[in-house]
Amino acid sequence: MVHFFLVSFDTPTIYVLKKRNSDYKGTYIKLTDFYGAETQPIKYLEAITTEKCPYIYYARQSGFFKIPGIPVAYWVGDSIIELFETGSMMGKYADLKQGLITGDNDRFVRGWHECDINTISLSERDKKWFFFHKGGEYRKWYGNLTLVVNWENNGNEIINFRDSSGKQKSRPQNVQFYFKEGFTWTSLTVSDFNVRYMPTGAVFAAKGSAGFCKNKENLYYFFILFSATFNVLLLTGGKHGHIRILQG
């Protein structure tokens, strides 16, 4: 198989030569590091005529079935595939949740500096504005706490935000997890997965999904998410660019 860059030949074609499970060891040529319709044909010919080409990989199809979603992750070694087979899913240690969709950010979301400081909650629950984790720019460890959301009276105005037919326009998901300690990340990124500590007292969004450790002592698992290994696992599963929670 030849793996092209997104913009490569004018008419790239994929052929299915054998439709069945097989332990056959396939040959894969990875051209994604080479840009352009002029460069990639040259690199392809170079690959098939060079004895030891650094962008040729060999992988058994049976290994792909051990990875959730069965991606054709030919570039990873047996040790990474073994992690998928013997390791534990993150959901064993933490609840991963999507949060609030306001239905109208211009109406319900502000920069904290736009609001009267006396109406912003630092820990109180009787305020109008609460800090809002909504993704944001690439940042690790902590931060991106620049927004606040109107969750006055337990979100009464957002929860009852409806169109003319009475249909709810907002989507307040997993409200029972609001204000809890956890970790959050930016769902849309062109860089590495970036996760941040989320202290108590804040609301989180769908674009700034969050995780909540099932046991407080397991919060140290949060630090694993910064590792190069974790990013490799995400890429192996095809999770690059848009990291989202499918359920919850």
Image: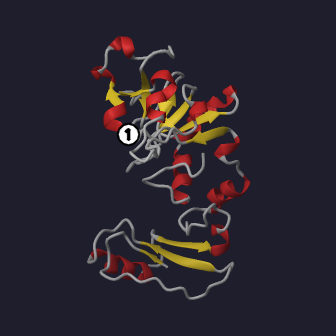
In the foreground, 219 or 208: 208
Q: Secondary structure at mark 1?
A: loop
The quadrant where residue 142 appears: top left
Farthest-out residue, front: 165
Side of 115 where 235 appears, left or right: right
In the foreground, 20 or 203: 203
- Residue 1 position within the rendered picture, expressed as x and y whole percent measured from the top left: 49, 79
What residue is rendered at 44% in x and 33% in y?
158
What residue is rendered at 49% in x and 42% in y?
171
Q: Residues within 10 Å of mark 1 (few under 14, many from 20)?
A: some
- Residue 67 position within the rendered picture, expressed as x and y whole percent measured from the top left: 64, 62
What residue is rendered at 57% in x and 41% in y?
97
In the foreground, 44 or 198: 198
Is residue 142 among the parts visible in the rendering? no
- Residue 116 position within the rendered picture, expressed as x and y whole percent measured from the top left: 31, 15
The quadrant where residue 19 appears: bottom right
Q: In the rendered image of this protein, does residue 85 appear above or below residue 188?
A: below
Q: In the rendered image of this protein, does residue 12 appear above or below residue 107?
A: below
The C terminus lies in quadrant = top right
In the foreground, 167 or 14: 167
* Residue position marked by numbered label 1 in the rendering: 138
- Residue 68 position within the rendered picture, expressed as x and y whole percent measured from the top left: 63, 60
Q: What amino acid is found at the position of numbered circle 1 in the picture?
A: Tyr
